[in-house]
Amino acid sequence: MDKNDIKNLAAAIVLSLLTLLVIEWIFPKDPIYENTTSYEQKTYVSQEVSQQASGNNLLPVEQINDSPIVAIKSETLEGVIRLKGARFDQLILRQFKESLKEGSPDVSLLTPSYYVAFGMTSLNNGIDAPNNQTLWKADKKELTPNSPVTLSWSNQQGIEFKRIISLDNKYMFTIQDEITNNTVNSVTFTADGVIVQINPNETQVVTVHEGFVGVLNDTLKEIKLKDLKEDGEERFSTQGGWIGLTEKYWLSALIFNQNIRDVSNVFSYQKVQGNDVYSAYFVSPSFVVPGGQKVSNTAYFFAGPKELNLLENYQKELGIKKFELAIDFGWFYFLTKPFLIILGFLNHFVGNMGVAILIFATLLRLLLLPIAAKSYESMAKMRKLQPKLKDIQERYQNDKMRLNQEMMMLYRKEKVNPASGCLPVFIQIPIFFSLYKVLSVSIEMRQAPFFGWIQDLSVPDPTSVFTLFGLIPWDVPTFLNIGIWPILMGITMFLQQKMGPQITDKNQAMILKWMPVVFTFMLGQFASGLVIYWTWINILSIIQQRYIMNKYGVK
């Protein structure tokens, strides 16, 4: 490996990891949307949505906490449906905690300022449809997976509305609207659903998409909240698909009838009386209810974690197009998704995600064994050539052209390819980024323990050498929180480096000498699962490299 190869390789690695580190330093690790609207305050939704959607949301309305409710209770969810406006505005995920601290509350997904509603709009003058002020009647006080709830309301023109809401044993609500026309004249309606979020915390992680998301016309659409402020809205017409709002690990999604063409979908931002109002809503094409007949329409509402198996099952069972893409797999989808599936399988088999990562790293190393072996053979031969290379460099240090010619002649004579040692590193880069993505976005990694002090593989090692690993109670800057695993990674990187060909150029040798230290600080801010993976890969590489060096008689 000549000087330029080493310099370019070092620059590529440092720049790649530095990019990730800068992102992690600048942006918070796990932002939580803050509910800035209290129960006593007013909520608002955009005038435009109220005109084009149901009117269920969006004219300024008083909070309706005094409204009667239907309780939602299952093993996975707990919340309420308010009968005034028939809206979901409280929903708790019972199987997930906000943190690992004792007494931590369950994750709250929907709040009074982050809510969901479905409705209808009449296209006939003088015909009323349910709106945000409508007080529905419920046949039960509690919605459970075994007990659907039917809401009913009738207007003064002889038309009856029923909404049958059911819940499965996971996170999917089915919303079936029935309109019975007891008159002799036909009436025309549209059906809609809307997710509204008011005054969210818009500080978001760049490496993980948060904000508007959906699959429309078979294409994934991702729009950050801040990006919609300038344009105000994005509109799409589609058959099939879904829309929603996503956070790092959680998703609220509306799934409309997959067989209806020309469903209008809108991602919207409005400034309403000082409030930032974001909404994702769909409006169906108009449909006619003939006199004396009944027409029904079905939609779905998902509120829960972005678990791959869960989303894939709904995708298959309900025919939802590309529902799995709610998980932000990133550019390396072809690697990220398989990695997540393999890690999930291994975790199910061994019962520990950290151990699953070690097994995954070992299997990956075995898969790349032929390439790595060839690389280490080349490195061993290069190390054996060090005395001859040093002699050439000393003899022709003032003649660069002759120096390169002599070195190339030596490589050809000894049948050594100096660049082949770089190949495993370049192969590792997309693998590293893909695993980084898996650890960053996968709910399966959230709060997944390893052993000892590592109780969450998705966050950095909580220990710090600068506090003597917790013995000294003082706060240090985030970038100085270097835990035990990053230190182990740095040591293994240093040992691996010492086994490679020695660099005669003093400047380049100095750069490489400090790389383990730089990487220790950089990876100290990364997910501990990723650092454990990197450390284990280094150990396996050292074993393999030592074996090959002994094989070729290299000390």
Image (spheres, rainbow, N blue to C red):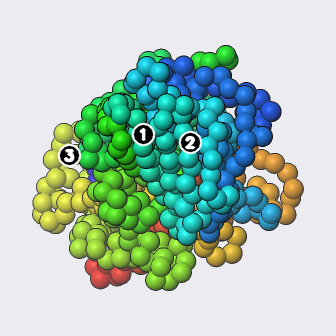
> Compared to 373, does 12 lie above or below?
above
Report the residue at 77% width, 47% height from top.
Answer: 476
Inspect the image, locate mark 3, and give the three-letter code of the amino acid beneath it: Asn
Identity of the residue furthest to the right in this view: 473
Residue at label 2? 153
Inspect the image, locate mark 2, and give the three-letter code of the amino acid beneath it: Trp
Dot 2: element: strand
Report the residue at 24% width, 60% height from top.
Answer: 420
Question: Could you say which is closer to the camera, residue 211 or residue 140?
Answer: 140
In the image, which disc is placed on residue 182? 1
Report the residue at 47% width, 21% height from top.
Answer: 126
Report the residue at 63% width, 31% height from top.
Answer: 133
The Cα atoms of the two marked residues, 1 and 3, are separated by 93 Å
Q: Do the residues labelled 3 and 2 touch (CB within 8 Å)?
A: no
Q: Where is residue 371 in the image (x, y as percent from the top left)?
A: 24, 68
In the image, which disc is placed on residue 404? 3
Query: On the picture, is 36 further left or further right than 46?
Result: right
Q: Are marks 1 and 3 in contact (CB under 8 Å)?
A: no
